[in-house]
Image (cartoon, grey):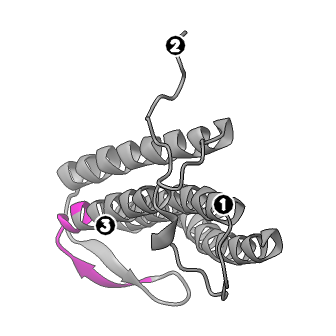
């Protein structure tokens, strides 16, 4: 029988990834591929300086070389990759809560949230690339790109808080 996702990714604590875990991993890997493709495409088609920093209102306030698309995409790939590595090794995951003795269930929950964070971080870096492109091309969808960035940042906060609460409650 052919498996849809076959990554041989049993976590180091011996747990078996659920279909949801495999879906999160596949989504994160897909987002990493999109990040790579978008950053290369945007670098090749850039026509001048691109925004590299945004103020608190989401407006571009610093401009730089188009190769910064590759830097931002590379940082996104690195972040997604580190989250996926952490999802296999729960001892690498540190939440803002104190755990006396971690159970296998808590480790599995931490691994699930590391996979979730990989997806959220992939979306965050993709939204940054899109926001840079919107300002570079003076597109009419700057507001939508800014909103996508805000939603991605909020999702990072939500995943962190939810993971912390869930791990504590399963203990």
Secondary structure of the residue carrying numbered label 2: loop
Give the mark nearest the N terminus, 2 or 3. 2
Which residue lies under the disc numbered 1? Answer: 104
Q: Is 118 rendered above or below residue 1?
A: below
Q: Can residue 142 be seen in this view?
A: yes
Q: Where is residue 1 in the image (x, y as percent from the top left)?
A: 55, 9
- Whether residue 108 sits left or right of residue 7 in the image: it is right
Asked if labels 1 and 3 touch by Cβ distance under 8 angstroms, the answer is no
Quarter of the figure that contains the C terminus: bottom right
Determine whether, in the image, residue 75 is placed left or right of residue 108: left
Residue drawn where x is 44% and y is 67% of the image: 128
Identify the residue at horizontal 46%, vertical 42% (top origin). Answer: 9
Direction from residue 75 to residue 26 in the image, left or right? right
Q: Secondary structure under badge 3? A: helix
Which one is earlier in the sequence, the residue at label 2 or at label 1?
2
Q: Which residues lie in the magenta part?
A: 60-70
Residue 39 numbered tag = none
What is the spatial separation of the Cα atoms under label 2 and label 3, in whole angstroms?
Answer: 34 Å
Read off the residue under disc 2.
2
């Amino acid at each position: 029988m052919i498996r849809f996702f076959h990554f041989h990714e049993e976590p180091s604590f011996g747990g078996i990834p659920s279909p949801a875990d495999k879906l999160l991993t596949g989504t994160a890997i897909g987002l990493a591929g999109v990040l790579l493709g978008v950053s290369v495409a945007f670098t090749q088609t850039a026509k001048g300086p691109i925004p590299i920093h945004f103020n608190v209102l989401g407006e571009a306030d610093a401009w730089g070389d188009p190769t910064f698309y590759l830097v931002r995409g590379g940082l996104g790939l690195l972040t997604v990759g580190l989250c996926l590595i952490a999802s296999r090794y729960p001892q690498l995951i540190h939440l803002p809560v104190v755990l006396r003795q971690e159970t296998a269930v808590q480790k599995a929950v931490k691994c699930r949230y590391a996979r979730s964070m990989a997806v959220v971080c992939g979306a965050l870096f993709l939204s940054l690339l899109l926001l840079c492109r919107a300002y570079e091309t003076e597109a009419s969808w700057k507001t939508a790109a800014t909103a996508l960035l805000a939603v991605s940042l909020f999702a990072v906060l939500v995943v962190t808080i939810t993971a912390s609460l869930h791990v504590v409650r399963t203990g």
